[in-house]
Amino acid sequence: DIALTQTPLSLSVSPGQSTSISCTSSQSLIHTDGKTHLSWYLQKPGQSPQVLLYEVRNRFGGVPDRFSGSGSGTDFTLKISRVEAGDIGTYYCMQSIQLPYTFGQGTKLEIK
Amino acid sequence: EVKLLETGGDLVQPGGSLRLSCVASGFTFSNHALSWVRQAPGKGLEWVAGITGDAQGAYYADFAKGRFSISRDNSKSMLYLEMKSVRLGDTAVYYCVEGGPYFDVWGQGTRVTVSS
């Protein structure tokens, strides 16, 4: 199975500041179709997860451009600019290049 | 509006069986792959099983193989997860999710508790 390692596992950020989360894969996530199947999710407290980004950097509909993704191969980053109170929750990366799909351990974001 | 609604979660004894259901609305059901993803109390997300839109392909995590069975009824826009020989470690909220290779719609989840 492909292992995804997220760092850090927790973050405390002041409103208006920027922060980033790293996701490292045990194998390349570049598919033969040329796409990289790495997506990011946010699970707000008490809610179901919601997709933020897919194929590394594509924002899902309605996701603010404060959320951006980068990386290639095995190393990926989610950047959150101008953090807001509503951004609190746990962030997960997920790979879908190979079954079983796997998630990172999650990174919990809190606001200072 | 695209929606997924899970039902069927319950308290079940170790070794018992349970069937989870998920009804979908707001999209052409048969065109979309679906999966079950679970989350144990206080833990992260774990993919359980997935099925293609035409139900010709079903795929499982190793822990689910031989015990869980995913199926769908496209005429009813329903997704199912049959769980047999459940274990304490199967205690979790089970989410019905739409999509592949990324999950763009999630249900609210249904809670399965395995306990004697």
Image (cartoon, rainbow, N blue to C red):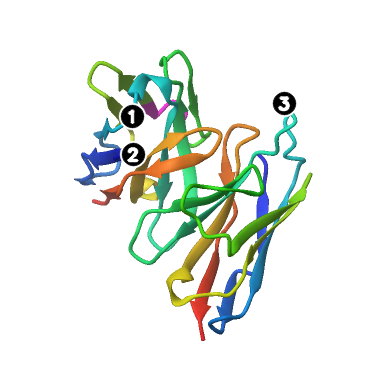
What is the number of the mark on residue A51?
A: none
Tell which tag, 2 or 3, sits nearer the viewer. 3
**Residues marked 2 and 3, same chain:** no
**What amino acid type is highlighted by mark number 3?**
Asp
Q: Callout 3: 10 Å neighbours few (<14), some, many (20+)?
A: few
What is the number of the mark on residue B27?
A: 1
Q: Callout 2: 10 Å neighbours few (<14), some, many (20+)?
A: many
Q: Between B41 and B74, which is closer to the camera in this rendering?
A: B74
**Real-space Cα separation, disc 1 to disc 3, in angstroms:** 26 Å
Residue B15 in percent (x, y) is at 30, 37
**What amino acid type is highlighted by mark number 1?**
Phe
Quadrant position of the N terminus of chain A in the picture? top right
Look at the image and tell me whether residue B64 can be seen: no
Residue B35 in percent (x, y) is at 43, 34
Specify the subunit that label 1 lies on: B
Residue labelled with disc 2: B86
Q: Residue at x 30, y 49 (%)?
A: B108
Residue B38 as seen in the image, left or right of residue B116: right
Where are the magenta residues, as a range?
Answer: B65-69
Secondary structure predominantly adopted by residues drawn in magenta: loop
Are circles 2 and 1 on residues that touch, CB within 8 Å? no
Are circles 2 and 3 on residues that touch, CB within 8 Å? no
**Residues marked 1 and 3, same chain:** no
**Real-space Cα separation, disc 2 to disc 1, in angstroms:** 32 Å
Residue B77 lies, with reference to residue A84, above or below; the image says: above
**Residues marked 2 and 1, same chain:** yes
Q: Between A18 and B10, which is closer to the camera in this rendering?
A: A18
- Location of residue B87 (image quadrant): top left
